[in-house]
Amino acid sequence: MSTIIIEQAEFTALRDLIAQRFGIYYDDSKQFLLQSRLQTRLLKCRVNTFVEYHRYLQLSADREAEWSELASVLSNNETYFFREKAQLEVLVGEVSDEAVKMGGRLRVWSAACSTGEEPFTIAMMLRESGKLRPGSISIRAGDLSPKALGKCAEGFYRELSFRATPPEVISKYFRPFEGGFFISDEIKKMVEFFRINLLDAKAVEGVGIHDAIFCRNVLIYFDKPTQKRVVEAFAKALRPGGYLFLGHAESIMRLTDLYQPVVTQKAVFYRKKQDAAN
């Protein structure tokens, strides 16, 4: 298939439609990237131009199935076990200690879990800490991409996912198989996976109240109004004083007054203010 060029007007129309649906924003510098990512979708949908594809996403009887496929195409699934470990240590440390004092139950949400390395890391670290009984730990993990969630359900990972994983953890919680590893059933059953669009405020509210939310390296793909919308929706899904963990390149200092930033020598994170309304 020869490359189909996306014209400026076509790019703008599709960019805005995608941002409205998923929150993912492609600025003008990413026109070629969007063109490249959509090439195979034009072929699958049997359309010849980006104008036709735009119309397909709005009017086709199969448009919802295509939006589902598009979610996987546009998602960046770069992740690995024990990524940005300092924040995870805050969870296992002070967040878990607070949970023990507040009744011994910990509720964690990995809000953009990709292929599952983050929530499975959380499960392993909490299990290793021994502070809470496995039955008192709730780990929920959501993502927009059906393809990524399929990888979570499979639980099979190759070498690149283990670049920061201690060897003793691999031997304890993984089973080798044909050039990779399956995660153990005891860790797998600790995590509940589900599909979610973070722009869907009702869906976010329906996830329930949590002690900590991880949403790392996601806001960088949103414009400022969408970032504000998402983090304020998260506030409704956090208990007063609950923790929000973002990526190192992400800041919400000037977006909302619902959180108090916490800066330590090892990690930066946010706490929902005690007087912030749910």
Image (cartoon, grey):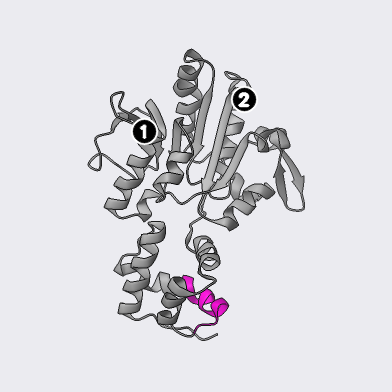
Residue identified by numbered label 2: 128
Position of 204 with respect to 230 (left or right) is right
Q: Which residue is drawn at the image coordinates 54% and 75% (left, top)?
A: 40
- The quarter of the picture where residue 17 lies is bottom left
Position of 159 with respect to 66 (left or right) is right
Is residue 215 in sight in this rendering? no
**Residue 228 drawn at (x, y percent):** 29, 46
**Residue 10 drawn at (x, y percent):** 35, 78
The stretch in magenta equals 37-47
- The quarter of the picture where residue 166 lies is top right
Number of the label disc, if any, that sits on residue 48: none
Q: Which residue is drawn at the image coordinates 44% and 81% (left, top)?
A: 52
Within 10 Å of disc 1 (Cα), the crowding (few <14, some 14-19, many 20+) is: many
Is residue 122 in sight in this rendering? yes
Q: Is residue 254 above or below residue 137?
A: below
**Residue 175 drawn at (x, y percent):** 75, 41
**Residue 81 drawn at (x, y percent):** 57, 42
